């Protein structure tokens, strides 16, 4: 059991490692790794829908007789404010350590059990308010480019052997403390639901997860909504539908990024970059929406 159940290895970045990562950019080019979110956007299975609803509008203020600045308003000053509803796992996001549970006691990283540390306002340990900043070296492993295709077919596994081959093909190395992003090409079809379905839930299998863990990554991500391949080709005994999440997130505290937009950096041929993602710290949340960037 870890001594700090609130934080994974990414939170223990040494100052020297952070400074080294900040020295990586030499061109000053910034690439967004997120797509815009919108009402009704595609999401994983049973997640609540993402919606944006207007709460205040100029006309509504007048109709309700509201005067937020008092009665003196000769210029007809108004404002707009919205209510955004949806899960923190909408679009580009990072899973908090408390996101995935397992066992009869519904425990997560650090052996923290829902029986003792889950309230009506969310988990108390390993929740979204404990997410660290991510400012480190990022590496893109472009699986479709290695295979010579646009996007992986649906439910197609990426193995440890293939990751090793891609690393050699791209001429990169994976270092301790890195964040490795794995492109499947899924978001090249965004947001067409029929086209997305042809490429849904391809991703790393358990052998790839072990390879990444042994390489010393502190987080890993992909452009799919589930990160790992689904259904799991090797669920083990007893059968586990998400063995990769179990190994990396529950057992090792390795943060998982999902729905990360990788098309632009792939098209630019970028394989190494400064990766920055700053989670929104929300108590009781099980993750955080992100707008991460790659900088070269």
Image (cartoon, rainbow, N blue to C red):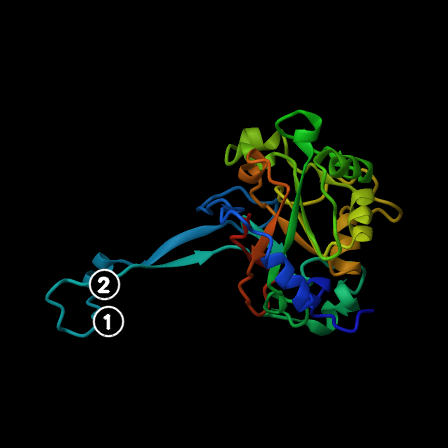
Task: Classify 10 Å Cα crowding around label 1: few (below 14), some (14-19), many (20 and above).
Answer: few
Viewer-side label of 2, 1? 1
Task: Give the residue at the far right of this rendering.
Answer: 237
Q: Is residue 266 visible?
A: yes
- 129 vs 241, nearest the viewer: 129
For the residue labelled by badge 1, is the local secondary structure a helix, a strand or a loop?
A: loop
- Determine the residue positioned at 79% across, 73% down: 3
Question: x%, y% of residue 237?
Answer: 89, 47
The residue beneath circle 1 is: 68
> Which disc, if any, is residue 61?
2
Residue 190 appears left or right of 130: left
Q: Residue 250: which quarter of the image?
A: bottom right
- 133 vs 126, nearest the viewer: 133
Rounded to the nearest whole Å, what is the CA distance between mark 2 and mark 1? 9 Å
Question: x%, y% of residue 283?
Answer: 57, 70
Q: Residue 105: which quarter of the image?
A: bottom right
Task: Classify 10 Å Cα crowding around label 2: few (below 14), some (14-19), many (20 and above).
Answer: some
- Determine the residue positioned at 73% across, 74% down: 116
Tag 2 near tag 1, CB within 8 Å: yes
For the residue labelled by badge 2, is the local secondary structure a helix, a strand or a loop?
A: helix
């Amino acid at each position: 059991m870890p001594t700090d159940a609130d934080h994974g290895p990414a939170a223990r970045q040494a100052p020297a490692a952070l400074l080294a990562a900040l020295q990586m950019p030499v061109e000053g080019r910034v690439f967004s790794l997120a797509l815009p979110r919108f009402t009704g956007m595609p999401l994983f299975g049973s997640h609540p829908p993402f919606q944006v609803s207007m709460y205040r509008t100029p006309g509504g203020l007048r109709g309700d007789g509201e005067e937020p600045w008092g009665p003196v308003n000769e210029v007809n000053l108004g404002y707009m404010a919205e209510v955004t509803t949806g899960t923190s796992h909408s679009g580009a996001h990072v899973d908090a350590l408390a996101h995935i549970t397992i066992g009869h006691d519904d425990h997560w990283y650090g052996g923290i059990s829902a029986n003792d540390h889950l309230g009506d306002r969310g988990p108390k340990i390993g929740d979204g308010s404990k997410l660290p900043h991510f400012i480190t070296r990022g590496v893109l492993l472009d699986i479709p480019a290695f295979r010579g295709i646009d996007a992986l077919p649906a439910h197609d596994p990426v193995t440890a052997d293939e990751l090793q081959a891609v690393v050699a093909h791209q001429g990169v190395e994976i270092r301790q403390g890195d964040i490795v992003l794995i492109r499947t090409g899924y978001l090249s079809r965004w947001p067409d639901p029929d086209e997305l379905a042809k490429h849904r839930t391809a991703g790393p299998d358990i052998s790839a997860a072990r390879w990444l863990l042994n390489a010393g990554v502190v987080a890993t991500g992909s452009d799919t909504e589930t990160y790992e391949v689904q259904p799991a080709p090797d669920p083990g005994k007893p059968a586990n539908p998400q063995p990769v999440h179990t190994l990396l997130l529950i057992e090792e505290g390795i943060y998982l990024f999902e729905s990360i937009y990788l098309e632009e950096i792939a098209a630019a041929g970028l394989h190494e970059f400064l990766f920055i993602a700053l989670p929104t710290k929300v108590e009781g949340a099980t993750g955080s929406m992100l707008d991460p960037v790659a900088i070269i």
